[in-house]
Image (tube, grey):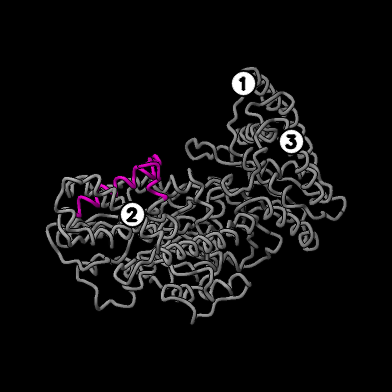
Amino acid sequence: MKNFKKKLRFVFKLCVYMYDDDDDLISHTQGVRRNAYKKLRNGYVGGVKRGKPLIEVKQVVIERVHLCEKHREKKSGVYLEEMVGRAYDCLTNPLGAVRFTFEKTVLSSASDPASFDRNDWGVADLFREFLFDNDGLHQVPMLTPSTVKWIKPNSLVRFRGMIQDMLGNEFYVGAYKNKDTWNTNKFTDVSQFPMDPSPDMRVWERRLLYCVSVPGQNSWADVTSDSVVNTYAASASREKRLRDTCSVSDEVEMQDSNDEIQGSPSAKKMREGGSIAPENMTEGTDCGMIMAPDFDRNSFSCLVKIYDSPESELKLNDVFEFIGVLTFDTDVKNDKNGESELESCFDREELLNLPSSKVPRLHCLVHRKLSPNDLIVRSPSMEQNPHLMKEIRQSLLRHFTVALGGDDLAASFILLHLLSKVHVRVDSIAVGKLSLNLTGFDKSSISVFGNRIDDALKNLLPFSHCIPLTVEFLNTASLAPVKDYETNRLVSGVLQCAEGSHFTIDETQLQSGTLSSNGVENTRLLRELMEFQKVEYDFKYYKMKMDADVQILILSEGKSNILPADIVIPFHPSSVDPTGIVDEQTLNVWRWYLATARSLPHSIGEDMQKVVEDDMVAARQADRSLGTEDFNRWLTMGRLMGVSFGETSLSHEQWQMVKEMERLRKERLK
């Protein structure tokens, strides 16, 4: 109490110092003493009932706090921020930070709507500074099926997922006047104050994205961490203790949105590894419990609302990290009868059959597109250089060779296959793809080496899928995404996946049978994906082909007649030696190597162009069956061989290695 009074006296003295010629200010002394800290703490300046002088005081104080946070400006040798605390907390009270920036904009613009209409007000920059410049990102809890049970609504969360459907735009009341004060509904679903239609109401738009956990995401690429949970809980506990210390009396109506977490029964059970009983949950967490039985980790979904971002920044099937305000819309869900007519006519979510009790909402403040490199834990010493890349390449090849029973040629082709990507499209040709068909498998060998290959890929690649190709699968599976016009939703298919995903197709289980019309269509879709790296989306009245960039490996007894791969190589294992256990540090190094090499640019110098051209002419003269597809495959292998050594141009030695691999492969095919 004593420290709090000192803080209030400092704020009051500062206000008087700035307005010592305003006699009206003195009459508001008690109001300032009671409310100054509250206004500063929550960043709240709306709803003023004490007249213009107090508004002016708060405007100046807020400006001083803003300057102090930016420049740590001193006043009388004491930091204002240290004396009165932060005006908001980006982690536990993000909406307070939003209100702070909005009200500062309103005050600085004399309440002119043109200044804040469809404007960011600096919110994105504020949160980027907190997240990336001040290392706040690791404190933000990850939204998952487990954490959604205890994360409180209106707190800051992050969600990593793939954009599975783009639901269009939603109109909402972004700003409105409550008497003489402007308020905002941005980054929220429900208005905090009564809202009647008026000429001062500003209607804005936001985009709706239906996002899901990335299909085929392997466990090592999941960033959910207990340390993040504990950090957030500790932060919320400190926030609660600060409020308890600063509580003056019942007159100061602090907006306590951050309850005690660390000492709660829920948190204790969480620390002990137990589950949280429903009776200990808030209304918001009940929604999470409803969702939990229906959605497993691989199908967890989130409705993301996007503000102030160009449409070109976010595309279907892109993987993003969204950081924003979590809401459950409990008021909308439980009190539809009290909803205003204006709010009801804007509500698209119920029409889309996305009830908030099953699909949480995230109002995005900051987003960033993720690449495979962003999912890898790397050490500061892991910087790309050819010498390091060559060493890692050799160790990874040894690992593949052991897993493949000593077949070093198959291991070399798998390495090039895993480095392949579509780096340019020329007409209908996807340049850079390299699908691979390993033949010679039977039911006994597939159970050994098939599992080894699958385990190796899951440990190294962020997104991988395994498809057991059977007649039943082809006849019953939904491979292509289909538009459902009753719900106005895009129903996902097996082939809707993130860029860089890997498919292993086990054809050893395929037996004779009759394909239905759906089976024939699914076979065509798989061939289309292999040959052209495109997936056909079914919109009922028309079909649209969309670009893909995936790696496809086929394991079969003989050469696949259903799915023609770029490279066919018979598999020749010589032993079944144990693969051993690979430590996590080594796995991280291999993951980093694959992601880094795959992203390297590559070219063929003028001197090597002449060598490659002469070799192709000689090969054509020796074998008239060679065509454009063969030469394109050689060039792709040359590029992949170069980047596998961490180099951006093809060397003569690497080109000779490509030619030798092709020679050995053709010998096996005889």
The answer to whether any part of residue 303 appears in the image is no
Picture coordinates of residue 573 (x, y %)?
83, 50
Q: Nearer the viewer, residue 436 or 277?
A: 277
User: Is 62 part of what is drawn in magenta?
Assistant: yes
Q: Amino acid at mark 2?
A: Val
Q: Is residue 4 above or below residue 358?
A: above
User: CA gap, disc 2 to disc 3?
Assistant: 61 Å
Q: Which residues are magenta?
A: 54-82
Identify residue for label 1. 605
Q: Nearer the viewer, residue 63 or 313?
A: 63
Q: Residues within 10 Å of mark 1 (few under 14, many from 20)?
A: few
**Nearer-N-terminus badge (1/2):** 2
Which image quarter: residue 395?
Answer: top right
Q: Residue furthest bottom?
A: 279
Tell me whether circle 1 and circle 2 mark residues in contact (CB < 8 Å): no
Give the residue drawn at x 67%, y 41%: 593
Q: Is residue 532 above or below residue 519?
A: above
Q: Amino acid at mark 3?
A: Glu
Picture coordinates of residue 394 (x, y %)?
77, 38
Which image quarter: residue 599?
Answer: top right
Identify residue for label 3. 662
- Please state which of the two labelled residues, at mark 1 or mark 3, is closer to the viewer: 1
Identify residue for label 2. 98
Q: Tell me the SS state at disc 3.
A: helix
Magenta portion: prevailing SS class: helix
